[in-house]
Amino acid sequence: MSVLETNDLTKRYGGRPVVDALDLTVERGEVFGLVGPTAAGKSTLLDLLAGSVRPSGGSATVLGLDPWHDRNQLHERVGYLRETVDLDGTRSGWEHLRTATDRTIDDAAATATFDRVGIAPDVAARPVRTYSAGTARRLSLAMFLVDDPDLLLLDAPTAGLYRSGRLRLEAVVEDAANEGSTVVVASRRPAILERFADRVAMLETGDLVDVRRVDGRTVDDEAIVRLRVDRVPSVDLEAIPGVESVIEQSGELVARVSDADAKATVVLEVAHAGAAIHDLAVAAPDDSDRQRPTDSRTTDGER
């Protein structure tokens, strides 16, 4: 049984289609991935499915409802985690969670929800301004899980998360699907989606260009690539697909990558830029490789 279906769904801004005559069906209990570059239309499509924006043409049905006309009813059954969520730095995680739902949340239910996303009770009790980016992202996810929604819409949910956080997110998504929820996840990184999605769709400038089934979960290819070079080359390594971050430290370039192809590409790009590579090491990431937050008030160290 389909949870959502679109027919010629279109959204234009200034006469330009951002989502262009899109036909899509997602089945109940499915984990469906949307992958594409920036400005591909992923966030706009999620906005349309959540009833946050009105379509310019076509139609959509979500949980048997029209997302725009029935958006108040839909809001009670859909958890929508946007790429950016406004949090009040003066309030604690507990306060955010309790005001994220219309129903009363007791301490046991709140603790269970925080445990689900990997936030300890003492961290939840602190002001959000003390959180790292990853912990703030986990809090945002907890706020949209607290009502056990029938449909989860997740826009770039791994933003700010390192390996442990991404593994926790995968477990949350798989648990939700096993319990009967449907999950739609948007990301620029196909390697991340292929780790837990049942199907992955490619979006390009608002067009659905490909939908394929993921036959098996991909292996964890995340790694740290360390290059000791004679000089730092003028090349944007973070533009390489699969490169999560690049920092310079102690005369080294340290790249965190999320798929196997990116490892070789980083090395080739540095060499092509004319930098001499004196040493090269590739290893699995650990806590010592994490780039620490710059805010001195951040003390939890979680990602």
Image (spheres, grey):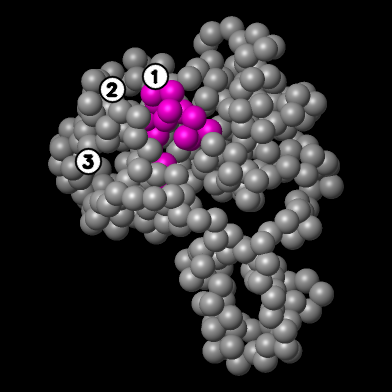
Q: Earlier in the sequence, mark 3 or mark 2?
A: 3
The residue closer to the viewer here, 29 or 82, is 29
**3D distance between C-alphas at marks 1 and 3:** 20 Å
In the rendered image of this protein, does residue 17 appear above or below residue 238? above
**Residue at 64% in and 20% down:** 112
Name the residue type under label 2: Leu
In the rendered image of this protein, does residue 232 appear above or below residue 141? below
Asked whether residue 135 is drawn in magenta, I would say: no
In the rendered image of this protein, does residue 174 appear above or below residue 96? below
Which stretch is magenta? 172-187
Name the residue type under label 3: Leu
**Position of residue 262 in the picture relative to residue 112 (left or right):** left
**Residue at 25% in and 20% down:** 65
Residue of label 3? 24
The residue closer to the viewer here, 170 or 130, is 170
The reply to whether the C-beta atoms of the residues labelled 1 and 2 are less than 8 Å apart is: yes
Q: Quadrant of the C terminus?
A: top right
**Quarter holding residue 222:** bottom right
* Residue 199 percent across, percent down from the top left: 32, 46
Density class for disc 3 (Cα within 10 Å; few <14, some 14-19, many ≥20) is some
**Quarter holding residue 252:** bottom right
Question: For numbered disc 3, what is the local secondary structure?
Answer: strand
Q: Earlier in the sequence, mark 1 or mark 3?
A: 3
Residue of label 1? 77
**Residue at 31% in and 35% down:** 48
Name the residue type under label 1: Arg
Residue 63's mark?
Answer: 2
**3D distance between C-alphas at marks 3 and 2:** 14 Å
